[in-house]
Image (spheres, rainbow, N blue to C red):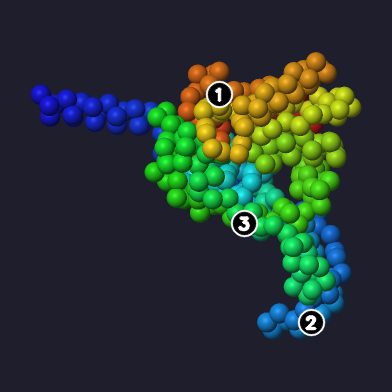
Amino acid sequence: MTRHLALGILAALAVASAAGAQTKKTGPLVIKEQGSFFVGGENKTVTQAAAGPIPAQTGDITVNQMYVQYQIPVKGAQHVPVVMVHGCCLSSKTWETTPDGRTGWSEYFVRRDRSVYLADQVSRARSGFDPTAFSDVRQGKTPAGQMPNILDASHQVAWTVFRFGPRYGEAFPDGQFPIQAVDELYKQMIPDLNSTLPNNPNPTWTQMAALAAKLKGAVLMGHSESGFFPEQAALIDPSGVRGIISIEMPCPSMTGAQVAALAKIPALFMFGDHLNDVTGGPANWQQSFTSCTALVDQLKKAGGDAEMMHLPALGIRGNSHMLMQDRNSDQLADLVIAWIDKHVEARNRGTR
């Protein structure tokens, strides 16, 4: 009886696992075009000390340029392109293959005939940054205390901020993040040079707006640190912004004029589960959710098409802050694509 009971439990767990997880796509991925380019950047004249084989020199360098890689499916022209931007201490790897080896949102969207553009924030990964503050300290032009900070989040901070569990090392029983692959997520976390950036505007906002205009219309998607970047980009230049998707971030207070401007663009705000169930982390997700819910109400009152998609309210439980990497990521991608089809594609049909 004990053996049969154990086998029954294992079988039930296997069924539940199969239902709750997705497998890696094995069919051919057919695309029309792929490539990469940079958006923006500015030239700056600098004097640099000798370093290795490079002699001391005065010359021009390019700083604050944004790297973008893209894939265009065969039927991509039928849909509005989607630009995906990552959060703090991460890169556009966020949207690629998940830590446990499943299809990420970038490929999933392409398989759904959407052109996808992945951007590394300015000062991160393959994008540029301004190194002159470091050079000035090295040359004695400024004191060492003015050296810009390099942020590199720890595993412990990531666990709680990303809401894998109530405290480091303890996972939520219903958690959707593939905890067995958390070390692969930690490998994605890279040094953040945001302290080298000018404060207002952040160059990434400007480059995102320029990218949307270059594409003659795009949906801008941001997550966490970049969650409100689509709105900031639209406030700089709304001409190419066809839709806004903001995933898990605090929403700042907006003036009446800013709300009126943003109300002209369809906007989706998305939050996962356990917003108030983590101790010891610096992020207050319940407060972020409340601030964005208030902004959604403001946009609606201004005549806008805005929606708060709170996954637990839809009966979808256990999603972490890294919901695009969670075990049910395909299901969540389908929700986002359905929103784009209803609120962006229908509105822009015939304009592309």
In what quadrant of the picture does the C terminus appear? Answer: top right
Q: Quadrant of the N terminus?
A: top left
Which residue sits at x=82%, y=29%?
254
| Residue 162 in the image: above or below residue 12 | below
Q: Mark 1–mark 2 contact, CB under 8 Å?
A: no
Q: CA distance from mark 3 to mark 2?
A: 27 Å
The residue at 72%/36% (across/down) is: 228
Q: Which mark is residue 56?
A: 2
The image position of residue 3, as x and y in percent, is 12, 29
Q: Position of residue 242 (x, y in %)?
A: 76, 33
To which residue does mark 3 refer? Answer: 191
Identify the secondary structure beneath mark 1: helix
- The residue pinned by badge 1 equals 311
* Viewer-closest of 175 and 309: 175
Q: What is the spatial separation of the Cα atoms under label 3 and label 1, in whole angstroms?
A: 31 Å
Q: How many marks?
A: 3
